[in-house]
Image (cartoon, rainbow, N blue to C red):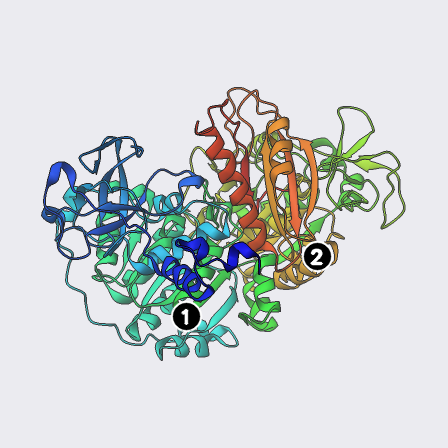
Amino acid sequence: MSSENGQTGGGAEGAPPEQLALIRESVRKAKVPKAKPRTWRGAALAKELPVARVLVDKGVLHLDRYFDYAVPEELDADAQPGVRVRVRFGAGRHRVREGRREGGGLIDGFLVERVAESDYSGPLAALAQVVSPERVLSEELLGLARAVADRYAGGLADVLQLAVPPRSARAEQRPSPEPLPAPGVPEVGSWGRYERGAAFLESLAAGGAPRAVWNALPGPEWSEELARAVVATLASGRGALVVVPDGRAVARVDAALTSLMGEGRHAVLTADAGPEKRYREWLAVRRGSVRAVVGTRAAMFAPVRDLGLVALWDDGDDSHSEQHAPQPHAREVLLLRAAQDKCGFLLGSWSCTVEAAQLVESGWARPLVAGREQVRGAAPLVRTVGDADLARDEAARAARLPTLAWQVVREGLRHGPVLVQVPRRGYVPRMACANCRAPARCRHCSGPLEARGSGADLRCGWCGRDEGAWHCPECGAFRLRAQVVGARRTAEELGRAFPAVPVRTSGREHVLDTVPGTPSLVVSTPGAEPVAEGGYAAALLLDGWAMLGRPDLRAGEDALRRWIAAASLVRPQRVGGTVVVVAEPTLRPVQALVRWDPVGHAVRELAERAELGFPPVSRMASVAGPGEAVAEFLRALALPPQAEVLGPVPLPVTPAGRPRRVGAPPPGEHWERALIRVPPGRGAALATALKAAQAARMARGSGGGGGEAVVRVSVRIDPADIG
């Protein structure tokens, strides 16, 4: 000990060790100055729990936290957790008058909780208004929204904008009906066609939480089977939620539920209903008047009480991916709900996605499938026409349609309508081997190779590396091919070939729901196929290369899903139902269609993606924006271990006047995109790092640093179009 420390003079510097220890302990125990809540203009403060924690609806990541406000006594009764409020936001510490913070603009928010005191040391502003005493934000919904925000590197306010519909005062003023008693346990019905179908319904009716991936048999019975699963859940005294891709599917499930239970036992949540009706239905669910919900992707957040089952139909449909930030997918949201509420889970489709196969492979869910005899009895006959057949067929060379297709159409028109599926206009193919059609992929990262302009040079669409000496790893060939086939000409030729037959079209501008069972030609784009009364007599799936050749990792899976969806509307083989697909018969998706084995195709795809490090085995994120902004973002990003950055590479420029795709640059702007890939188990760390980096950029861009505005970049977790 130094001589200075040994002195016994006054003050802390000369105090003995025991006294110094006491001083330090007293400092540690000293209370941090708390906020002194002051109400607006000196109004009285709430006597109990005078501090409200509010989530402000700013929608920016660096403000993704709660803010404390004082609760005036006059708002004490209505200012309860879960209500909508308005607060003043943006006044700094310098705008304080007589101990009260003043100023700032009015902004909407949600009151999350009431507490006795605040950790904030300055004066608190007061709640400006309770918009409505209706408690729209429950603890369960708040927890789900937070989990979704963390999963997709987004803000909580953005998720709540998707989860809670806009307020309608007139809908709030109308009381919701009294809840009806639980229905009885339904009959097994067509669930008996599946090996574990009856056991699945029995488990739901008994209060269990079974988790299943359901490969539905072809035909229209899927909507009734979904409805029976909902009724079985309601019979146990719990709620059920069903999410389907579009309004046509909602109408079918709605009709099936009404047929089984009658009116008033379920709610329909779709954007087409209008804001007031949708909010009224949503309130009936929130208040517990209705415990069953069917709707499109916005219904994935429906506040169903005592949730016993979440079900999703056709998870591979693009409609299940939300367009607005943070762009969650309905499948992932329902998986989070199943884990959070410990309820049953049902993922159904005629086909099978790789994500669904992964759920079964991991043991998280059980397969719910029919035996092969049941599949053969329900599926149509599938015939193929490949390039070798087209080369020998003079009719195909003249009209681009093989003779077999003409024969099937003529025979089918004798017995009913014939469906003709043609790819959407604008599919851009990737490069493939001209000999065996294997996709051309990068030797470094296995990304898709693209042709550079009109030359023969190739470049990877993921990492941007040039490929000057490509050869096919499957057959050793050196030639590549790319093919784009228009759909409009095919439809016109079919109409001229059968002038006496009515031709109906179903597509983006006008989508048909049903068509009569009389002979007719129904030309449809994928996903817009109407249901025929009694089923189609035949179907043509044309221009298979236009779908199989898309520059997308999911091209084969998506083509098979669209083919099976169309073929499922065709009558069974035993009554003459026939499907002709114009695609190379040796390709894996075509073979899976012929065998009607989408599950086997998904399992093999999953094994290949695991070997190559593709999603969903690995997790991916995209960072897109102007080149310098992307480079700056990547330099500031603290990536987790084993993360791999692919690119950046230029993105195609969006032409002026064309609709902008999700993740694409604004018209005329030149953007670049980098992909970030992490191994299994690192997805949460990647999302956290991306959110932190994006929040830091947005904080700098808000003007706090006094510099120039920061150019924003687009960050997406699990992008659907990675190439």
Q: For residue 591, which numbered disc appears in the image?
A: 2
Relative horizontal placement of residue 157, taking residue 480 as reference (left or right):
left
Give the vertical position of 429 relative to 171 (above or below): above
The amino acid type found where label 1 is placed reads Lys
Quick one: label 2, few (<14), some, or many (20+) residues within 10 Å?
some
- x and y percent of residue 579 in the render? 61, 52
Going 52% across and 66% down the picture, which residue do you hit? 213
Q: Of tags 2 and 1, which is closer to the observer?
A: 1
Relative horizontal placement of residue 689, taking residue 608 as reference (left or right):
left
On the image, which quarter does residue 305 sit in? Answer: bottom left
On the image, which quarter does residue 343 sit in? Answer: bottom left
Q: Secondary structure at mark 1?
A: loop
Give the vertical position of 350 relative to 280 (above or below): below
- x and y percent of residue 591 in the render? 70, 57
Q: Secondary structure at mark 2?
A: helix
For this rendering, which residue is in front, 184 or 315? 315
Give the vertical position of 20 relative to 522 (above or below): below
For disc 1, the marked residue is 342
